[in-house]
Structure formats: structure tokens, C-alpha cells
Image: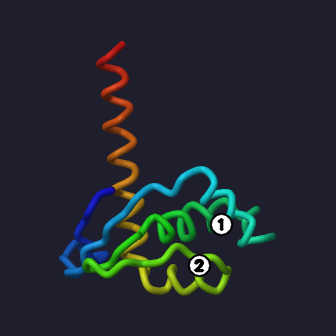
Amino acid sequence: MSELTQANSDGSARGRKLTVRQPDFLQESRITKLCGEASTNVGYMYAYVFPAIAVIAVDGDAVPFPTTYLQIEGLIARVGREGCSAVLNHMSSAHNAEAHREDVKN
């Protein structure tokens, strides 16, 4: 679980704190199933759906994990463009740091 401060597209702070956690494999599977035919659109899933469902709290207020497609859309709307971008950047940084640790071990 990580916290990040969301920035606007111009780099200025928007002031929201997003708490994120990578969904587990089963949760990702369930979300893919809920998205139905839309799940075949890789760009949609990786730019909108997966970053949004990684948000588990906004400014300390818990965000329930979606169980319907309408809840997924609501979460995408709540997190917004800048929030999804912040989550993607955070996940990318975390992935790169993990890859670097693995390289150092070997």
C-alpha cells in the first residue's frame, strides 16, 4: 500500500492524497469479467480501469472495491485523468525500483 499526492496535468498539486494498492490476481480477473467486451481494449483497461481500481482511499476515505461495471465507471470518474496518471506513474516507478533490486541481487 502506498500514498501519493495527485498532481494536475501542469504539474501543480491538486491536493488529493490517493492511497493505492495493486489488486491481486483474482481481483483483476473479476474486474476483467465485469468489463465484458470492453476488456479486449487493452488501452482502456491499462489506462483507465486498472489504475482506478488500484485506488483504495481518497484523502483517507476508503474506496470500496467495485463489484459492478457501473461502479468501475464511477471510480474512473472519481479518480479522474490526473489521478489515473499519478497512479500509472507511481506503479511504473515501483516496478522499475523492483526490477533494479532484482538486477542488484543477480
* Residue type at the position of mark 1: Ile
Residue 35: horizontal and vertical position, in percent?
72, 72
Query: For residue 69, which quarter of the picture?
Result: bottom right
Q: Are marks 2 and 1 in contact (CB under 8 Å)?
A: yes
Q: How is the image coloured?
A: rainbow
Numbered label attached to residue 81: none
For the point 75% across and 65% down, the residue is 33
Looking at the rendering, in which quadrant would you find the N terminus? bottom left
Left or right side of 22 for 26: right
Secondary structure under tag 1 reads: helix
How many dots with numbers?
2
For the point 63% across and 54% down, the residue is 26
Left or right side of 2 for 42: right
Residue 22: horizontal and vertical position, in percent?
45, 55
Q: Residue furthest right?
A: 37
Label 2, label 1: how far apart the Cα atoms are: 8 Å
Residue 88: horizontal and vertical position, in percent?
42, 59
Q: Residues within 10 Å of mark 2 (few under 14, many from 20)?
A: many
- Whether 18 is drawn above or below 40: the answer is below
Looking at the rendering, in which quadrant would you find the C terminus? top left
Q: Residues within 10 Å of mark 1 (few under 14, many from 20)?
A: many
Q: Earlier in the sequence, mark 2 or mark 1?
A: 1
Left or right side of 5 for 20: right
Q: Nearer the viewer, residue 1 or 42?
A: 1
Numbered label attached to residue 31: 1
* Residue type at the position of mark 2: Ile
Secondary structure under tag 2 reads: helix
Q: Which residue is mark 2?
A: 72
For the point 72% across and 72% down, the residue is 34
